[in-house]
Image: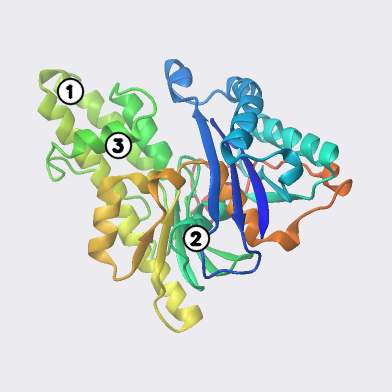
Amino acid sequence: MTTVMGIETSCDDTSIAILKGDEGNYSTSPEVLAHLSFSQGEILSKWGGVVPELAARNHLFKLVPLLEECLTKADLKMTDIDLLGVTTHPGLLGPLLTGLNTAKSLSMIHKLPLTPINHLYAHLEAIHLTAPQPYPYLGLLISGGHTMFLLVTGPEDFEVLGSTIDDAAGEAFDKGGKLMGLGYPAGRIIDDFAKKGDAKKYDFPIGLKSSGDANFSFSGLKTSLRTFLTKHPELLKESEQNKYDVCASYQEAIVGALKLKTKYAQKLCKEKMGKNLPIVVGGGVACNSRIREMLKESYKEVLFVEPKFCTDNGAMIANYALRTKNAAIPFPESLYLDAKGRFINKTELMNKYKWKGAKK
């Protein structure tokens, strides 16, 4: 059995977890010995979004207390840890480097191997924390910074089938919420308000609706909402019901895009694998109740990552480090690891559609 510590600081959530599992045994879920997180949502709400420098500083304040508490909760010492996993990409560089440097320090002090983790892959593979899923599967990642489809044929075998060319679904929720004055983060607020509203009351567009592929675009939806609110400046103030209806209609456009593009992603899977694949849905936005309802209604075999493992968290990092132990970098080579902010080149995707805003 291998005991793994996972560290996640890619954005505004500071999270550490300790798992124990059998390396190479993919038929059972690892045991979560300790899992603690700190969200900066309330701290960052006054700025209406994530401020990288502030996020990095808050990670610095919280990492050591979380580390100590995790070890206490698991009744372990650092000498009991066999492997470290840390998010190195993609994400905000300041926050990433804060977590990475913490992991490097632990690697140096305790001579531990360190696995660099792509936390997008970890989001999908988090399905194995509660419900081991055989390969291959179609992964739908929906988060604040990324929305994409991946064909997953093994723990280290991921192929991008489609991605957003601009904003992610999570950004569409947060930016839409900001336009409506709902506060940050807005995804959960819109989800709750939408349950009381009429999703057919207003018509908002689906980006790249006729592209015939698995790529997304949400920036036009945000612009459409801004234009709508400019034309109807008093609408949200007139009644709470109006606010609920706008939230429901806006959310339904996001949900409609996910439903439509999943059809094209499944088509690509069938062309490549000869059959439709089970769909695994992960990422913070996968907690949205309407998205879960729609995908279950529309597709035969859909599995969702457990909500507590959907947002950025240390458990998914430790889990993925355990599943990819061969990728671990031994000390002292581990000290040369670096962080990387980007995963998808959106400029190239924009140019594919001759997007006017794309930089040449």
**Residue 174 percent location from the top left of the image:** 38, 32
Q: Amino acid at mark 1?
A: Leu
Front tag of 1 and 3: 1
Relative to 214, is 254 above or below?
A: above
Circle nearer the N terminus (2, 1): 2
Decide if residue 329 is on the left or right side of residue 21: right
- Outermost residue toward the top in this view: 46
Q: Are marks 1 and 3 in contact (CB under 8 Å)?
A: no
Res. 344 visible in picture: no
Decide if residue 299 is on the left or right side of residue 56: left
Q: What residue does disc 3 label? A: 224
Q: What residue does disc 1 label? A: 236
Q: SS class of the residue under badge 3? A: helix
Q: Residue at x 17, y 23 (%)?
A: 236
**Residue 277 percent location from the top left of the image:** 41, 74
Which label is found at residue 128? 2
Question: What distance separates the C-alpha of mark 2 from that of mark 3?
Answer: 39 Å
